[in-house]
Amino acid sequence: MKSADIDTKRWIGDRIKHEQINKYTEGGKDFIDDNKIFGILEENFNPDPVRVRDIIKKSLEIKTLSAEETAVLINVGDRKLLEEMAEAAAEVKKKVYDNRIVTFAPLYTGNYCVNNCLYCGFKSDNKGLIGRKALSMDEIRSEAEILAGKIGHKRLIAVYGEHPLTDTEYIARSIRNIYDVKVKTRNGFGQIRRVNVNAAPMSIEDLRVLHEVGIGTYQVFQETYHHSTYARMHPSDTLKGNYKWRLYSMHRALEAGVDDVGLGVLFGLFDWKFEVIGLVCHAAELEKKFGVGPHTISFPRIEPALNSDVSNNPEFEVSDDDFKKIITIIRLAVPYTGMIITAREKADMRRDALRLGVTQTDASTRIGIGAYSETYDKQQEERQQFILGDTRSLEEVIKEFSDMGYITSFCTAGYRCGRTGECIMELLRSGQEGRFCKLNAILTFREWLDDFAGIDTLLAGEKVIEKEIREVKEQNPAFYPKLVEYYGRIKKGERDLYF
């Protein structure tokens, strides 16, 4: 056996800390009870409309729904009730997040991985089929400079495979390098102000390292909460084969001081109804143990991937109508959470999702390793984890948002002001966070328009800003004078002013 193989095997053997699983379980059992979930779904079949409306009312009070209440909404088939649910989801979003849409870009740092997930284009079995690469720190800086200086992003989700070449030290160094980037723009400067991370499960000790370098939200998707499906999709001789190590990732993160955590499943691996209940159970578990639920929930649908029968022919494919129902139910069930739809979906679906409660989306998305620095005329299956559905530029997406009446927010102020963890949960539930975010959305959108927008986007964006400023004057007059001052300073070239 080669030395590199021995080192990788040793690295794999040291990753999972079983004591950091057992401390959270009850009698060795995790909090996802498959039979109980199936029972809840069956017991709440054909729900009473009166009960459905009572549950909707609870959600409008920004209260987390129970698994049973969520099952009631899942089983709604009546078209009128579904329309009422959709209207309520939009109202919940407005109460909590106002009129904002947050944008970001994914930055894939490498595609080395020790796992062999059946649905993934980066699986270890794809030897010789996919070019393997891990970006150097210089290459990561180059990617960040383009994202911050040419496109105008302020937030990234940095994506890392599970491999010794992209270990915790590598992640920490890459975050520091991204934060160090500062690029001259048309009227000011561009920089990445928040680096969220999508990575493998880590130990409490490793998570403390990332907390110290300023990690944003820490995402670990369970992929599927159904135990036997999870085992089938993730071979037992791989790190990802350990269901509980992954399930308790968020517990360890919160214990390590990482305030914001992100949940998600890959819809299409198992029955979507089961998975939605799993997400709600996970949110409830975090609220119960830590007083903090998920900062975000993601709900990607499975997409075609290189050499994957599971992805190319999903057994539990989710229809567009069911997908919209999923979005509606998650917004009602976990009303405080941020909801992320990505460029996996086509543009028309993303438009519909905004109306149902989505608060975050990516744009100008490239998921090839080092792809932002290259000419990118078409997607290349052998370089990507999956195939994208929407490759429009950030400007195209922002123009569309503006035409729809949404303001694009690049705000990261709350995180730097300490409005995270339990604090942010209370502010979100009460609607107070939306007031701060409305102010900061106006300021950061003004920055982007001045630094990056073409004339049509600029005019459309300014109409939105004018409306938002009027609303601040009417609804939040105490902050209006300061907003006007900051707004004027930004128009003169100052940057990163916030409430």
Image (cartoon, rainbow, N blue to C red):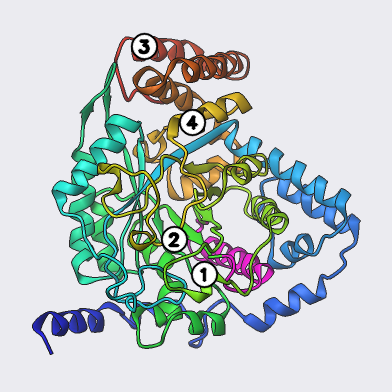
Work out whether mark 3 precedes mark 4 in sequence or the reverse, and give the earlier one: 4
Mark 4–mark 2 distance (CA, rounded to whole Å): 22 Å
Classify 10 Å Cα crowding around label 1: few (below 14), some (14-19), many (20 and above): many
Instruction: Using the image, determine if residue 298 lies above or below residue 414.
Output: below
Q: Amino acid at mark 2?
A: Phe
Q: Is residue 369 left or right of residue 462?
A: left
Residue denoted by label 3? 491
Residue denoted by label 4? 396
Instruction: Using the image, determine if residue 495 lies above or below residue 334.
Output: above
Q: Is residue 485 left or right of residue 206?
A: right
Secondary structure at numbered mark 1 = helix
Classify 10 Å Cα crowding around label 2: few (below 14), some (14-19), many (20 and above): many
Q: Is residue 317 left or right of residue 5?
A: right
Q: Amino acid at mark 4?
A: Glu
Secondary structure at numbered mark 4 = helix
State the residue lying farthest toward the left: 3
Mark 2–mark 3 distance (CA, rounded to whole Å): 40 Å
Mark 1–mark 2 distance (CA, rounded to whole Å): 9 Å
Residue denoted by label 1? 311
Secondary structure at numbered mark 2 = loop
Pick the front one: 430 or 349? 349
Picture disc at residue 410: none
Look at the numbered discs 1 and 2 and tell me whether their residues touch, using CB distance below 8 Å.
yes
Mark 3–mark 4 distance (CA, rounded to whole Å): 23 Å
The part of the chain drawn in magenta is: 267-293
Mark 1–mark 4 distance (CA, rounded to whole Å): 29 Å
**Quadrant in the rendering for residue 319:** bottom right
Look at the numbered discs 2 and 3 and tell me whether their residues touch, using CB distance below 8 Å.
no
Residue denoted by label 2? 386
Instruction: Report how many numbered discs are placed on residues in the image.
Output: 4
The answer to if 285 sits in the magenta stretch is yes
| Residue 192 appears in the figure | no
